[in-house]
Amino acid sequence: MIRLARDLTRDDVLAIANDKGAKPFQARALVEAIFDKGLRSLERATFLPKDVRAALESELALAASRIVDRSVSSDGTVKFLHELSDGETIESVLIPDGDRTTLCVSSQVGCPVACVFCASGLAGVRRNLTSAEIVDQFLFAREHLEAEGQRDTDQRGRRLTNVVVMGLGEPMLNLDNVEAALRMISRDLEFSPRRITISTSGYPDRVVALAARALPWNLAISLHAADSRLRKDLVPTATKEPRELVAAARAWFESTGREPTFEIVLLRGQNDRLADADALIALLRGQACTVNLLPWNPVAGVEPWIATPTDEVVQRFAERLESGGIKTTWRRRRGADRDAACGQLRLRHVHSRSESY
Ligand code: SAH
Ligand code: SF4
């Protein structure tokens, strides 16, 4: 049976390599290449004799997924659809923006939280991703950029600068695997933890527990509204109050020294009124944080009352927050086909195969 290398221990891989005829120093080099350097393809293990590589192919798989679709937006955003070993699909998204190149990774297949505006939650959740499947998205993106760098394209010379766990899924519901994957990305693959952000829709207890163990990752909390009832309209499964999320963010700041971000997906006529901004000012007063406004990216299949506010409304909302002493950021949507919110490519794929959910 073929096994996924990153689900095995170093000793397991060593034993398999020895068994397939690798010399001890070659087996050790293979273990280092896989676990420390992120080797994804046995073809690239040129330090092994050809016959050993061929024998290993039948027993050891290095990549946890293969790319079955990709879509490129006019602004250069690339979405990858990964097919996992059991046929499930997830997305990762590469977003070039000035000097930054951000990778958005998924943490679950689908999402059980079911926020009313989000493509990822529309079909529920299928399962958690393994840590190998999360790391794989990172490795794939890095490899993709390296390959692009050798061609004469817009992506030339780009390196991954940021990783955000903002793809499909709720990371706090798969925290063990997410944490293991991020540790591997930051320690073994030498990607600065300061450039990694975990985004959560709630789960204050887990945020507080993670704060005590976390490497210096960044935290984003998807708050959406200061008013409890309004928030529940948008995140129907939420059981915690907005003030509990704010308290968790404070605990995070106190234990990591890193300022959290609150994300607000702005929906026309729902949570984009000046009174909503005032409620946020009251809730966040004195809190070290930034608010990031995300004008809603249209998603097919959501309720008809969900719509995107105009830029003017978003600007006014941002100014109101700023005048209330809250650091606020937001970005105008660029290309008309920009749909950086994860989940849509997968949904199209799932629907086209008409799977039953
Ligand atoms: N489940 C986590 C992380 C994934 S979602 C969370 O909710 O935080 C990452 C961010 O994208 C969240 O802030 C979410 O509210 C936002 N988002 C989801 N769908 C969106 C859409 N259609 N338009 C704009 N932002 C969206
Ligand atoms: Fe899940 Fe986040 Fe989408 Fe809500 S916004 S359904 S928590 S992925």
Image (spheres, rainbow, N blue to C red):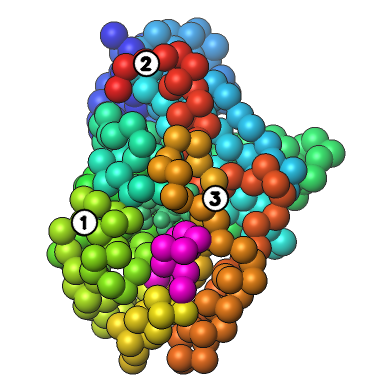
Name the kind of residue labelled 1 in the image. Answer: Ala
The residue tagged 1 is 238
Query: Which residue does the numbered mark 2 point to in the structure image?
Result: 355
Q: Which of the 4 image quarters holds residue 1?
A: top left
Quarter of the image holding residue 31?
top left
- The residue identified by callout 3 is 297
Q: Rounded to the nearest whole Å, what is the CA distance between mark 3 and mark 2?
A: 25 Å
Q: Are marks 3 and 1 in contact (CB under 8 Å)?
A: no
Q: Residue at x 47, y 30 (%)?
A: 346
Task: State yes or no: discs 3 and 2 in contact (Cβ < 8 Å).
Answer: no
Q: Nearer the viewer, residue 78 or 298?
A: 298
Please state if 294 lies on the left or on the right of 244 as rendered. right
Q: Nearer the viewer, residue 89 or 52?
A: 89
Q: Which residues make up the magenta segment? A: 261-273
| Residue at the image position 62 percent from the left and 63 percent from the top | 310
Q: Residues within 10 Å of mark 2 (few under 14, many from 20)?
A: few
Residue 177, can we see it? no
Above or below for 9 versus 297 = above
The secondary structure type at the circle numbered 3 is loop
